[in-house]
Amino acid sequence: MGHLSTHVLDTMNGCPAAGMAVTLQRLQGDLAVTLKAFTLNADGRNEGGALLDAQSLSVGHYRLIFSVAPYFRARGVQLPEPAFLNQVQVDFGIADASARYHVPLLVSPWAYSTYRGS
């Protein structure tokens, strides 16, 4: 069954990004509709599991917005103003609503990486 999930790892500190704020949006042309805003749990994941379950997932364009600078500042990291990375925005497409889509993020205050996970 299809679903959408995410997981964030803090590569600066070598741990899950517990407490990071994340927003999920569906993109409809020039419009971005917020579907969910949440804070990552101790494992760096959404507390409720999947962001979108099989009934909610549909073909289309989506965006995850990760609040990187506020997360690192809350951990006591001294960042310049403005921070090099304030938010990381990942735009991606769902081509098969019956498939699993996992969008992990590996992040530090200065770099990030993402990919389609399983």
Image (cartoon, grey):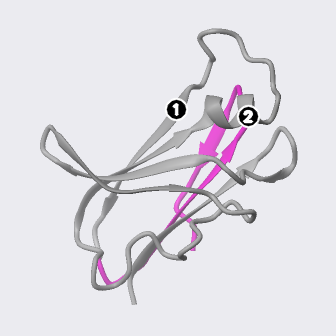
Q: Which amino acid lies under the numbered mark 1 shown in the image of this protein?
A: Gln
Where in the figure is residue 111, as x and y percent of width and height? 68, 31
Was residue 109 drawn as part of the magenta stretch in this picture? Answer: yes
Task: Identify the magenta region.
Answer: 97-118
CA–CA distance between discs 1 and 2?
14 Å
Q: Quadrant of the C terminus?
A: bottom right
Q: Residue furthest top?
A: 81
The image shows residue 117, relative to residue 2, as above or below, that is above
* Number of residues whose C-alpha sits closer than 10 Å to that of mark 1, classed few (under 14), some (14–19) or many (20 or more): some
Give the mark nearer the N terminus: 1 vs 2: 2
The front one of 70 and 32 is 70
On the picture, is 75 further left or further right than 109?
Answer: right
What is the x, y in percent for residue 18? 72, 54
Q: Is residue 91 above or below residue 70?
A: below
Q: Which residue is mark 1?
A: 87
Amino acid of disc 2: Ala
SS type, badge 2 = helix
- Label annotation for residue 74: 2
Residue at left 53%, top 75%? 48
The residue sitting at the left extreme is 29
Circles 1 and 2 in contact, beta carbons < 8 Å: no
The picture quadrant where one finds residue 80 is top right
Lateral position of residue 72 relative to residue 92, left or right: right
Say whether residue 1 is left or right of residue 115.
left
Furthest residue toward right: 14
At which x and y percent is residue 73? 72, 28
Image x and y of residue 91, in percent: 37, 46
* Picture residue at 40% right of the left edge, 90% below the top: 1
